[in-house]
Image (cartoon, coloured by chain):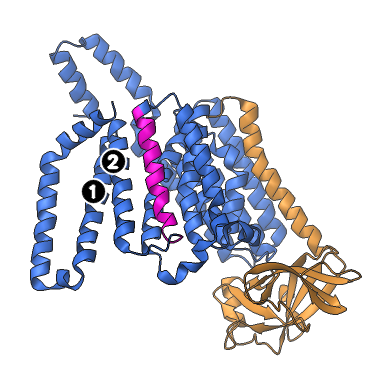
Chain colours: A orange, B blue
């Protein structure tokens, strides 16, 4: 049990400050000038939408991603030049750090939240040919979803 | 008439206390927050419903509310709740403090969800639980009742188990061996219980760890019994069990140095730990006979029952006796197989259930008394 006021103040402030720092960090990722647009394809080819979330595979256009199909391992995907490696590549201007899990590359950018009414509205409009994902990436390889483009139009402005 | 009133009347009738002493006991008990558990329960339920309502409102009006307003509103609410918690702490309003603290903790979890949705961070729910339990661990220590620590411990353990099974960083340690993870979980709870008892004996967190140690042990025993032979190969990587061995050593050391237990109770606890660990290693020894697993489950349940009785925890003792009886019954079905599902088999099974219940009902008090005296 907490006996001192100072301890209680710290214990209540800590989660608030941590969440504020997390928000600022996420915002800073969006400010990155390094932006890429990539096509996506559905986990389920009939429908990309799964409830409130759009779940997809990103078409990186790089051959030989995650050649080892067993277990989980950190992987680095370089888009310029197009190579995949289990070690951090040198001289890569557009790098995405992720995890190879059972032969699949995952970088925590494979789903997009949609509010209920917007999800209903977009049902049928979203398909692999017309939908692109906008990512901002940091020099360390951290990728963040910035926007979704449907027929070239930003979802944020729809 | 309440239980306290009945006891007071009985004690006055037997001349143990007089009526003025009885009145002083009444006044003392009335001041305890535990006496208004219905009130605090309803207030906590209210807090839960309000939290869910606010989250639903935000979700329903997602498009209309700009991100900045959503985040700003969320942080204002958190700061407001924190201020209110401080005020109730200073003014000694115990029930309001508990309700507001629970609301604050739930809003912290909702905030993680909100940030995750706004920035499309794409994490799993267990990662959110893990983050939440880490950033709110200090605030949980402020709780005076058991509900908040109990919820926090449950979320922490759920997050930890899923992390151990799914996170890349944990793969070199646990090798996705679910048996090693479930073996380690009750031992971790026991280790945390030892630490918590040393630091604060009567705190809600200690009671929460107690409750989760028993729950996780039961769950682990079920998991080890229902493992399928196809999973056995991955269980043969011995290094996956190292965290559990380390936790066992820590728990054993803590128990041995404890002032709370008698020597016989300490020995009993060691026996429980040994009997608990053995079934997790049977697959390493290529033992797959279900009777071997059942024997150890029955042994662990029996030893835990005796230990609980030695602590005079009669309700828990009876619950564990019930689990023991259930396991015996399942063993009967396992042993007889198809025969138990025939007409005669079902009649005999029903007879066994009724017979066991009658014997248990007749002897439960004498059994508890015997077990209570066993470890003296």
Q: Which residue is mark 1?
A: B322
Q: Residues within 10 Å of mark 2 (few under 14, many from 20)?
A: many
Please say whether residue B293 is one of the residues in the magenta stretch.
no
Tell me, yes or no, if residue B238 can be seen here: yes
Eyeballing the image, is B351 above or below B217? below
Say the numbered circle drawn on residue B305. 2
Foreground residue among B39 and B327:
B327
In the picture, the quarter occupied by the C terminus of chain B is top left
Foreground residue among A62 and B148:
A62
Residue A125, by quadrant, is bottom right
Tell me, yes or no, if residue B312 can be seen here: no
What segment is highlighted magenta in the picture? B264-284
* Callout 1: SS: helix
In the picture, the quarter occupied by the N terminus of chain B is top left
Q: Position of residue B224 (x, y in %)?
A: 40, 59
Which residue is at a point 49% across and 60% down the rendered structure image?
B178
* Callout 2: SS: helix
Eyeballing the image, is B233 above or below B18? below
Residue extending furthest toward the right: A91
Q: Nearer the viewer, mark 2 or mark 1?
A: 2
Say the numbered circle drawn on residue B228. none
Asked if the residue at tag 1 contacts the one at tag 2, i.e. Cβ–Cβ closer than 8 Å, the answer is no
Which residue is at a point 41% across and 70% down the rendered structure image?
B229
Q: Position of residue A33 (x, y in %)?
A: 88, 67
The chain ID associated with circle 1 is: B
Which residue is at a point 65% across and 66% down the rendered structure image?
B122
Q: Earlier in the sequence, mark 2 or mark 1?
A: 2
Residue B9, by quadrant, is top left
């Amino acid at each position: 049990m907490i006996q001192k006021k100072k301890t209680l103040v710290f214990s209540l402030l800590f989660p608030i400050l941590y969440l504020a720092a997390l928000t600022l960090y996420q915002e800073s990722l969006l400010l990155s000038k390094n932006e890429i647009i990539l096509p996506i394809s559905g986990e389920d080819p009939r429908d990309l939408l799964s409830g409130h979330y759009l779940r997809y595979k990103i078409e990186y256009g790089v051959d030989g991603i995650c050649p080892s199909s067993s277990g989980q391992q950190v992987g680095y995907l370089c888009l310029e030049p197009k190579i995949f490696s289990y070690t951090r590549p040198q001289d890569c201007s557009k790098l995405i750090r992720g995890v190879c899990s059972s032969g699949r590359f995952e970088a925590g950018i494979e789903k997009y939240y949609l509010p209920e009414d917007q999800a209903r509205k977009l049902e049928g409009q979203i398909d692999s040919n017309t939908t692109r994902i906008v990512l901002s990436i940091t020099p360390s390889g951290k990728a963040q979803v910035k926007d979704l483009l449907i027929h070239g139009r930003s979802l944020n402005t729809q | 008439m309440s239980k306290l009133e009945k006891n007071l009347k009985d004690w006055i009738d037997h001349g143990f206390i007089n009526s003025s002493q009885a009145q002083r006991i009444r006044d003392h008990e009335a001041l305890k927050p535990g006496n208004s558990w219905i009130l605090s329960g309803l207030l906590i339920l209210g807090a839960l419903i309000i939290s869910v309502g606010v989250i639903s409102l935000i979700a329903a009006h997602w498009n209309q509310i700009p991100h900045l307003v959503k985040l700003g509103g969320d942080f204002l609410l958190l700061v407001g709740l924190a201020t209110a918690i401080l005020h109730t702490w200073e003014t000694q309003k115990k029930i309001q403090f508990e309700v507001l603290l629970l609301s604050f903790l739930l809003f912290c979890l909702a905030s993680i969800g909100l940030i995750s949705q706004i920035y499309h961070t794409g994490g799993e729910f267990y990662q959110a639980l893990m983050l939440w339990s880490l950033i709110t661990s200090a605030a949980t220590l402020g709780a005076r009742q058991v509900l908040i620590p109990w919820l926090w411990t449950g979320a922490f353990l759920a997050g930890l188990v899923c992390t151990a099974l799914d996170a890349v960083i944990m793969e070199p340690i646990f090798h996705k061996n679910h048996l090693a993870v479930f073996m380690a979980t009750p031992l971790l709870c026991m280790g945390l219980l030892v630490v918590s008892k040393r630091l604060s004996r009567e705190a809600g967190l200690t009671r929460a760890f107690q409750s989760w140690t028993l729950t996780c042990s039961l769950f682990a025993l079920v998991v080890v019994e229902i493992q399928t032979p196809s999973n056995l190969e991955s269980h043969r990587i011995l290094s996956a069990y190292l965290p559990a061995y380390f936790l066992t050593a820590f728990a054993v050391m803590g128990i041995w140095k404890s002032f709370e237990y008698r020597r016989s109770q300490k020995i009993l606890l060691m026996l429980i730990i040994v009997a608990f660990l053995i079934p997790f290693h049977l697959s390493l020894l290529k033992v797959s006979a279900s009777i071997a697993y059942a024997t150890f489950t029955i042994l662990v349940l029996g030893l835990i029952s005796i230990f609980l009785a030695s602590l005079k925890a009669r309700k828990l003792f009876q619950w564990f006796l019930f689990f023991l009886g259930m396991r015996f019954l399942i063993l009967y079905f396992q042993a007889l197989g198809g025969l138990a599902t025939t007409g005669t088999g079902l009649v005999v099974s029903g007879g066994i259930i009724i017979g066991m219940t009658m014997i248990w009902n007749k002897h439960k008090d004498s059994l508890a008394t015997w077990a209570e005296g066993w470890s003296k």
